[in-house]
Image (spheres, rainbow, N blue to C red):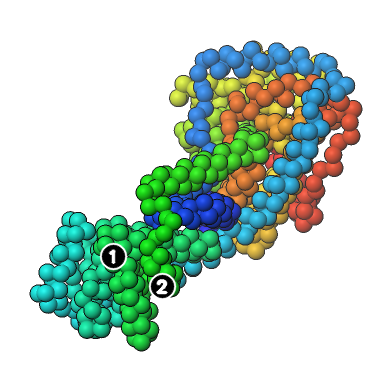
Amino acid sequence: MNWEIFINSKLVENLGWTLVHSVWQIALIALVLFFILRVLRRFSANARYLAAVFALAAATILPIVTFVQITANSSVEHFQIDNSKDAFAEQKNKNTRRAENLSEFADAVPASANADDKNIYAAIENSRRVFNENFAAVLPFIVGAWFLGIMFFAVRLSGGVWQLHVYKTRQIAEPSDEWQERFFAVCEKLKINQSVRFLQSNTIETPVVVGFLKPVILIPASVFLQINPAELETIIAHELIHIRRSDALVNFAQSIVEVLFFYHPCVWWMSSVIRREREFAADESVVKILENSHVVYASALANLEAVRQTANQTLPPLATAANGGNLMQRIQKILQKNTGIKQSSSAWSAGLALMFISALMLTVFSFNSGADVNAQTKMKNKKIAVGFVSIPPLDRTTNAPKDADATARLLIEKLKSHRVPAIGFVQGGMISDGEKLFPVRANIVRLWRDAGFEIGIGGYKHIWFHDTPYDNYVANAEKNEKIVKQILAEKNLPLRYFSYPFLNTGKTVEDRMRFENWLGSRGLSPVKYTIDNQEWMYSYAYDMARNDNDLNTMKEIRAEFLDYMTKMFDHYEAYSSEMFGRDIAQTMVLTPSRLVTDSADEFFGMIKNRGYQFVSMDEALKDEAYQTKEAPVDNKSGISWFERWQTAQGKKLRVEPIVSKSVVDIWYNRKDKNGPLPP
């Protein structure tokens, strides 16, 4: 896998955050288990065993649920563009209200009663976002280290499985008939209904159970000679109780959990508690079922340990050995005859432990959900709509318009991949001479349409409203409308949106009101962009480097562009917090350039990491912020609607992030200064 693809993978990011959250989640579960074990210290070992098993299960399930939750939160709902007649009529009805707002200017936007609190919240959220973005860069390395650790511990586990297989299949034999009869007698006494093989082995030095589907009890050949029959019967009973309790299966599951969470000491501690209490529980059962056997059983364990120490053999963790756990503690407990232990309360105490651990999991789930609702509601519910001007892409290569077609296809693929319900605004002069369509370029518009993206219009020519007579400006828009409606009519789709070229809305308020009334009569709504930017300048520089096949410069421009757009988002989000005390639904203008296409994964990923959900232009413009009274723009250059609203309040505009000097130089030193201009 390509490293760049790996580090930018959403799966890797989600896994990384899951691993980070698992650190505190598992630690919290372990802390609860610690206190539960203190409460249950005078209860049966089986109660403590079940509590530890429930805790380890919770420590496994909780990160899985967290991963699912993170993945769900990072997935954007599939978009659908509403082309119904009702939506069309609704947009028409809004035009008059929008135009009326132009004639009045508010001294200030009504402030919320808790605006200060919201601003503090916004500052906290911004700090959190910055931390998350910076920490996100480390996540691929965390996930990579985790995979390496899993591989190491998985190999070790596989080695243990193979070692047990060797024990079970090599140098084994059936015990004598006498011991076979003794074995079946113990099975009957313990009510073992499962088929269990009983074998003697020359490769092991301590009795052990191997397997859980077809369990085998292996007894060292030397043990038959070194301990007396009564002692060996208690050892066999111990192993059979492990089988009856399905301890080998639980032990195998433990080993898998240890592989997955090898990095967490609390997992190893909980697992050690399970193994310790498992042996204590089996000992309690042996002493309880085999009456008056505690002295014999304790002696058997002591003799087995002496044999094991002489042989100095270490069994893999998967094995459930008779002399496992802390042998001295086991012998002491056996000789105490379980004095003071509440033997009859295992089920009740296990239920109590389950209740506590379940309550903990619900608390953690609620905490996570609460974090999403309270700390991330505005993060995850931030919305943004994207408009592309102009469709089709500009031709700056020697292979036009085929290169524009290739760029459009790639861009459409990226938009669909990131579920961006973008709207593309057609510049009619690029696809038609006014009478006939240019086949390749017109088909690019059809590609956009057929991919499910909405189509709007700008002007037939990309002209400024500021210095164009009103009638000429209307004629320019009407000519474009006629061309684009021809393409939309092929699929019976309406035309609903207009995007001002250069974001210039005219020299006077009267001209704009008059024009927007004209738009309303045509069923068209003007788009207001909050995130204006100089992407077009970076795109021009990128195209020049691409024409020169300068891969290094292309890479540098992509990096500079992403850094610039990150700062632009900071810039406009600060406006949103200051003016409205919240994150309004944003609208962003871009060009359908090769730069945006080649940077799409990183660029749209950055936007999603900031908590944005991509929505249609319909949904974004429903935000009441777009009804805010705005100031007219008495200059040729268009500006963001945030700046129009800020100006209407008589407030100073924020200092906008600057474009990289190298990019500015390329733009102003371009040869064709009469070529296509920015949106």
Counting from the top left corner in percent of width and height, residue 196 is at 18, 64
Q: Which residue is mark 2?
A: 327
Q: Amino acid at mark 1?
A: Asn
Q: Residue at x 75, y 53 (%)?
A: 663
In depth, the one of 138 and 476 nearer the eye is: 138
Pointer 1 and pointer 2: residues touching (CB < 8 Å)?
A: no
Which dot, 1 or 2, sits closer to the camera? Answer: 1
| Quarter of the rendering containing residue 370 | top right
- Tell me the crowding category of disc 1: few under 14, some 14 to 19, or many 20 or more residues within 10 angstroms, Cα based: few
Q: Which residue is mark 1?
A: 292
Counting from the top left corner in percent of width and height, residue 249 is at 32, 59
Secondary structure under tag 1 reads loop
Counting from the top left corner in percent of width and height, residue 554 is at 65, 58
Q: Earlier in the sequence, mark 1 or mark 2?
A: 1
Q: Amino acid at mark 2?
A: Leu
Q: Residue at x 75, y 38 (%)?
A: 122
Give the CA separation, mark 1 to mark 2: 20 Å
Disc number for residue 276:
none
Q: Is residue 317 visible?
A: no
In depth, the one of 103 and 117 nearer the eye is: 117
Left of 201 or right of it: where is 404? right
Relative to residue 60, is residue 380 depicted above or below?
above
In depth, the one of 611 and 514 nearer the eye is: 611
Q: Residue at x 48, y 52 (%)?
A: 40
Q: Residue at x 77, y 41 (%)?
A: 123
| Quarter of the rendering containing residue 627 | top right
Left of 259 or right of it: where is 568? right
Secondary structure under tag 2 reads helix
In the picture as drawn, the residue positioned furthest to the left comes out as 177
- Tell me the crowding category of disc 2: few under 14, some 14 to 19, or many 20 or more residues within 10 angstroms, Cα based: some
Q: Is residue 505 visible?
A: yes
Left of 168 or right of it: where is 666? right
